[in-house]
Image (cartoon, rainbow, N blue to C red):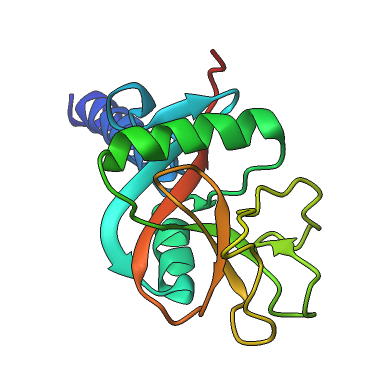
Amino acid sequence: AILPRFIVILVIVTFLVDVSTQNASQKQHGSSINCDNLGHRVGYKCYLVYNTYEDYAGASRKCLERGGRMAMPRDRKEQEALADYVKSFFHPGNWPVWLGINDLRSEGTYLFDDGTRVSYFQWRKHFLSSQPDGGRRENCVAMSSDDGDWWDHYCDRTMNYMCEFDDRVAL
């Protein structure tokens, strides 16, 4: 009678450990984030703005710790959706938000944080202050919350940031 009970207990413990491991794995990879309530979904990605100040490296690290990466708008559709999300998050006012884009490796060659080259740009164009304008000093890119345009900034400046997470469900 002891052996059958032991087997039942062993099966239950194995099941609970397996479920716990799956839940931890989901949290680690960002898939447990409720995008519909907390963030903004675009295709197979979920974006979340964090209203805490970090420099560029700190923002990148925080996104990675949460199972994501800094937001990397790769085309006009993503850019426009993210600009609308950031505008609504901070309205009214202009609060810049770090994106996962920089030219730290080579001045003027902008790369996403995953190392791929940026091919779509949304630089601010204005007769008083067109971007990028920082030369070798301003190497990290942020999105303006009032119009969605990109600005180059000092990477050690602290500001809000936006992370992107892979999402299994596309809308």
Judge by depth and name the residue closer to the eye, 49 or 16: 49
Residue drawn at 18 percent across, 30 percent down? 2
User: Picture coordinates of residue 115 (x, y %)?
Assistant: 75, 63
Q: Is residue 59 left or right of residue 73?
A: left
Q: Is residue 77 above or below residue 49?
A: above
Q: Residue furthest front?
A: 127
State whether residue 76 is above or below residue 137.
Answer: above
The quadrant in which the C terminus is found is top right
Quadrant position of the N terminus in the picture? top left
Seen in the image, is 9 located left or right of residue 168? Answer: left
Residue 49 percent location from the top left of the image: 36, 46
Q: Residue at x 35, y 73 (%)?
A: 158
**Which residue is at the far top?**
171
Question: In the shown orientation, is residue 148 left or right of residue 136?
Answer: left
* Residue 46 seen from this side: no
Evaluate whether residue 75 shows in this view.
yes
The image quadrant that residue 78 belongs to is top right
